[in-house]
Amino acid sequence: MNKYEKAIKYFEEHMKVLDNHCRHGGDFALEAREHTQTALEALKKQVPRALRNFGNGIGDCPSCGRGLDDNTKHCDDCDQLISPFLSYCVSKRCAECKHNNSDKVCDLYADKVDEIRRIHEEAGNDR
């Protein structure tokens, strides 16, 4: 977990407190919640993400859906950081990966698992 992911977790936990205060009134709580939400959105863009629907070197930005190629480091529309290697990694099964070394776990395995978790969480929020 990098520093941005730690900050995201911190702010998400504190959003619950702000939500409770907002239900009981108070302009300060509403304003603090709005600013915290904006900070969360910006922090999430600092975590490199895999392109969605990745194949043949192209995919979609995970934040805004813009079509991008695998040389893209960030989306010009929404500024989401993109990880070209993670895009490749998430699109393959580990056994099929050209970087697979049966002697050890891939260095990006934890990042791949985190990205897959984020994809599933986002899919759950879209329902």
Image: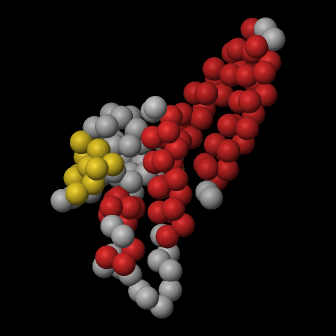
Q: Give the percent coordinates (x, y) of residue 81.
A: 42, 48
Left or right: 76 as drawn, with respect to 33: left
- The number of numbered badges drawn on the structure is 0
| Residue 78, placed above or below residue 46 | above
Residue 88 figure quarter:
bottom left
**In this view, which residue lies farthest toward the front?**
127
Location of the N terminus by quadrant is bottom right
| Residue occupying the point 31% across, 37% down | 65
Q: Which residue is at the far bottom?
A: 103
Residue at position x 64%, y 23% from top? 35
Where 25 falls versus 88 (above or below)?
A: above
Q: How is the image coloured?
A: secondary structure
Residue 85 seen in this snapshot: no
Question: Residue 104: image x %, image y %?
Answer: 50, 86
Residue 5 in view, yes or no: yes
- Residue at image position (28%, 38%) is 66
In the foreground, 117 or 79: 117
Is 102 left or right of 41, judged from the image as shown?
A: left
The residue at 52%/53% (across/down) is 117
